[in-house]
Image (cartoon, rainbow, N blue to C red):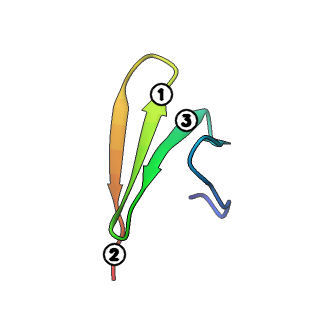
Amino acid sequence: MDGKTGYPGSRVGGFLVKEISKDTVTLDGADGSRQKLFLGR
């Protein structure tokens, strides 16, 4: 993500890395929002 390695529980670009799976990364924002990023293959 933006050239940085993230792990569950770490913060990347103001987001908390909530979950990492084979195809997605779930991020929680400080405002309570949740974003799911889909990883291309």
> Which quarter of the picture shows residue 20?
bottom left
Q: Is mark 1 on a helix, strand or loop?
A: strand
Looking at the rendered structure, which numbered label has been put on residue 29? 1
Q: Residue reaching furthest bottom? A: 41
Mark 1 Cα-neighbour bin, 10 Å: few <14, some 14–19, many ≥20: some
Tell which circle, 1 or 3, labels the residue nearer the N-terminal end: 3
Residue at the spot x=32%, y=68% of the render? Answer: 23
Tag 1 and tag 3, C-beta contact below 8 Å: yes
Name the residue tied to disc 3: 15
Three-letter code, disc 1: Gly
Residue at the spot x=33%, y=47% of the render? Answer: 36
Q: Where is residue 17 in the image (x, y as percent from the top left)?
A: 53, 43
Position of residue 13 in the picture relative to residue 19 (left or right):
right
Tell which circle, 2 or 1, labels the residue nearer the N-terminal end: 1
Mark 3 Cα-neighbour bin, 10 Å: few <14, some 14–19, many ≥20: some
Name the residue tied to disc 2: 40
Position of residue 33 in the picture relative to residue 14 (left or right):
left
Cα–Cα span, label 2 and label 3: 20 Å
Q: Is mark 2 on a helix, strand or loop?
A: loop
